[in-house]
Image: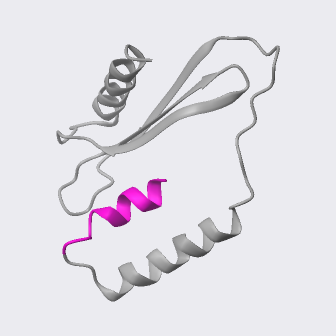
Amino acid sequence: MYAACLLARFMHSPANKHYGTAKRVLRYVQGTLDFGLEYKKGEGSVLVGFCDSDWSGSEDDMKSTSGYAFTFGSGVFYWASVKQQCVALSTTEAEYVSALEAAAQATWL
């Protein structure tokens, strides 16, 4: 999912390297069509969230990327990878922003 989100940033003015990367992502998706999520009955029904970020991962504007995932029982049911709206001045700030975004999403789950 991260690769697809990253490629989406270049939709309006793609270069040749973006086409090559898009083809690679599509080959990966084609090879994983039989994969799936499995939820097992009887597993603990506990909502667990995970979040992480990179610091200044975007070379264009130095913005960080947040990623988070939520599990319930035995499988992941929600995940996201989004570019942060602000420019974090430290890794700690990038992590706090990521945790804030994950917590905001968790309130709606």
- 58 vs 22, left or right, is left
- 96 vs 2, left or right, is left
The residue depicted at 80 percent of the width and 25 percent of the height is: 40
The residue depicted at 70 percent of the width and 40 percent of the height is: 37
Which segment is the magenta one?
1-12
Q: Is 58 rendered above or below residue 41?
A: below
**Front position in the image: 85 or 28:** 28
x and y, in percent, of residue 3 in the image = 46, 61
The residue depicted at 38 percent of the width and 56 percent of the height is: 5
- Classify residue 38 by image quadrant: top right
Count of picture labels: 0
- Classify residue 101 by image quadrant: top left
x and y, in percent, of residue 97 in the image = 29, 28
The chosen color scheme is one colour
Considering the image in quadrants, where does the C terminus appear? top left
Q: Is residue 6 covered in magenta?
A: yes
Q: Is 61 rendered above or below residue 77?
A: below
- Classify residue 85 by image quadrant: top left
The residue depicted at 36 percent of the width and 66 percent of the height is: 7
x and y, in percent, of residue 87 in the image = 18, 42
Residue most extreme to the bottom: 16
Q: Is 51 rendered above or below residue 27?
A: above
x and y, in percent, of residue 79 in the image = 49, 37
Q: Is residue 104 covered in magenta?
A: no
- 74 vs 69, left or right, is right
- 37 vs 104, left or right, is right
